[in-house]
Image (cartoon, rainbow, N blue to C red):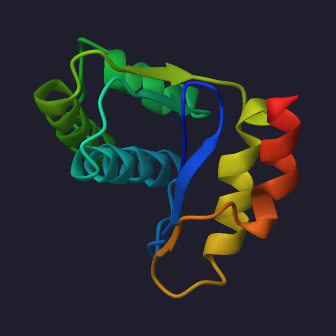
Amino acid sequence: MCIQDDQGWFVLAKTEWLSPITDVDIGETLGLLSALNWVHDLQLENVDFELDSRNVVTSFHSKHPNASELEDIIKDCVRVYNTYFRNSRIEFIRRQTNEVAHALARVATSLASFHLFIDVPICIGNIVNNEML
């Protein structure tokens, strides 16, 4: 997870991993729930959450949930979002646009539990700089 300000400048990043997760959509949804809780804990407002999982974004915005493990987590996401985020959005972006998150995800497996970055981590430095151009 990476937080950038409205100008695209790096603010904070966090990595975490859970084991075992066998379903990609469940992993992405747990990541969204974690991001929602983290951003709330930081007392940030007016946040745009960008995900490259169309299934998760579609499920989040769906008015017709189905009974599944994924939907149970989606309901938790919707509850947190509706409680704390009035002027925010959850939107789909193409995977190629989400390079920062994928670079952090690759590093996460080599770190114990979670890691909080207050400075731009080396693994995403070039990507963040290129996005600013």
Q: Quadrant of the C terminus?
A: top right
Whether 72 is drawn above or below 104: the answer is above
Q: How many marks?
A: 0
Whether 95 is drawn above or below 61: the answer is below
> Hey, which residue is sitting farthest top in the picture?
63
Residue at image point 34% right, 54% down? 34
82 lies left or right of 51: left
Whether 16 is drawn above or below 112: the answer is above
Residue at image point 29% right, 50% down? 42
Residue at image point 70% right, 72% down? 107
- Residue 82 x, y percent position in the rendering: 16, 25
In front here: 110 or 67?
A: 110
- Residue 129 x, y percent position in the rendering: 84, 43
Residue at image point 65% right, 49% down? 101
> Hey, which residue is sitting farthest bottom in the picture?
112
120 lies left or right of 43: right
In front here: 85 or 53?
A: 85
- Residue 9 x, y percent position in the rendering: 65, 39
Whether 116 is drawn above or below 1: the answer is below
- Residue 58 x, y percent position in the rendering: 44, 20
